[in-house]
Amino acid sequence: MSLYPARALERAMKIQEVILRAASGKILWMQAAEILGISPRSMQRWKRRYEEHGYDGLFDRRQQRPSPKRVPMATVEKVLRLYREQYFDFNVKHFAEKLAEEHAIELSYTWIKTALQTAGLVARQRKRGRHRKQRPRRPLPGMMLHVDGSRHGWLGPGRGQQDLIVIFDDAHSEAYYAQLVPEESTLTVMTGLKTVVQQQGVFCSLYVDRGSHFVTTPVAGGLVDREPKTQIGRALEQLGIELIAAYSPQARGRCERLFGTWQGRLVAELRSRQITTLEAANRFLASRWLGIHNRKFKVATLQSGTAFVPYRGTELDKIFSIQHERVVGNDNPVRFENLTLQIESQSFRYSLARCRVLVCRHLDGTLSVYYGQHRLGRYDATGALLAGKTAKGGHSSGAAKTA
């Protein structure tokens, strides 16, 4: 290619770009001829030469044999048409996989990327920032998990933005949990953490951003204050899980890259399956998407084995709840969030008036009142006592333990 003068190179690149734009349907062939300043008949000759000889045919008109590496024009047009009409919101890597899986078109990632960029269907990326060194992965699953929420228009244009809560393992990038919610909060994150502990076991540490539901940061951008603990911090401490707060987006690069990949793929997958509701999207996430992600992006661990420890206790429901202390009134009521939780008589104590108790709002919206290890009652969201949910005289009943 270097044998050609710079002016010939520029003209050949311009002709190729115009031909690919016309092949993609972004402009008409008549318009392509006008852009190049040639007649429609000459445009047909250029198109034919490109079909027969590929890019090099735009330079040397005397070449008689087509390049063995050329891609037929019919294939070029099909690839560009598929992207424009069906896969317009897929990233290049995802689109290349779909071409091979769904349409039996085996082309290199570089060729597809160049063709889409030249045709104006994909924007050219900015130059990357300064060089950084990647933090080594933890050697065993369960040594460190990442949790984060990404706000994005996951359900497509016109349907607002939602938060996607994801929990995945640092050791091999396996995703254990993914859920779309209207907004990331203490309760939505707790739901994910409880699910992972139930399914995988207790892990060693959790890597998070400095969101207010994870840690307290008195000064914006400053150091984390470990006291007082947030509800999530308290729950993790009770399970012996270390909470690690990141101090920059770069420190959480592995998580940022995962969300970048999912924003490029998941939105397109939901759109192609006509999934437009949170409920349907969450069913797809649990039944299909986690498996798809883990097959494509899970990597080998540095060591064999696992750091997960099965949870043998019976208090996950209590640990993963919103807890507040209250003082019992003279007639044994507990005031909590404009509700009155009436405590029934207990066999282990005549009265609980003026005693300090713990009120727990569970993930399902119900409430429990504890005095030490005694559960004094369980209530619905309106404050009504639930039948059979009170333990009298001693520790919580078996039904209460499994709640």
Image (spheres, rainbow, N blue to C red):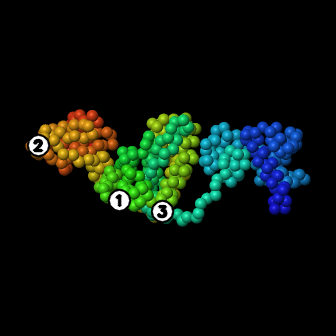
In this rendering, the label closer to the viewer, 3 or 2: 2
In this rendering, the label closer to the viewer, 3 or 1: 1
Q: Which residue is mark 1?
A: 225
Q: Position of residue 207 (x, y in %)?
A: 42, 57
Q: Quadrant of the N terminus?
A: bottom right
Q: Which residue is mark 3?
A: 137
Q: Is residue 166 above or below residue 26?
A: below
Q: Position of residue 159 (x, y in %)?
A: 52, 36
Say whether disc 3 or disc 1 marks the residue closer to the N-terminus: 3
Residue placed at 61% from the left, 44% from the top? 90
The 10 Å Cα crowd at callout 1, few under 14, some 14 to 19, many 20 or more, is few
Q: CA distance from mark 3 to mark 1?
A: 27 Å
Which residue is situated farthest in the left direction here?
A: 350
Q: Quadrant of the C terminus?
A: top left
* Element assignment for label 3: loop
* Element assignment for label 1: loop
Q: Position of residue 389 (x, y in %)?
A: 22, 39
Give the residue type at disc 3. Answer: Arg
Q: CA distance from mark 2 to mark 1?
A: 39 Å
Q: Which mark is residue 351?
A: 2
Give the residue type at disc 2. Answer: Ser
Residue placed at 30% from the left, 56% from the top? 228
C-beta proximity under 8 Å, tags 3 and 1: no
Give the residue type at disc 1. Answer: Asp
Q: Is residue 389 above or below residue 207?
A: above
Count the numbered circles shown. 3
In this rendering, the label closer to the viewer, 2 or 1: 1
Q: CA distance from mark 3 to mark 2?
A: 55 Å
Say whether disc 3 or disc 2 marks the residue closer to the N-terminus: 3
* Front-most of residues 211 and 147: 211
The 10 Å Cα crowd at callout 2, few under 14, some 14 to 19, many 20 or more, is some
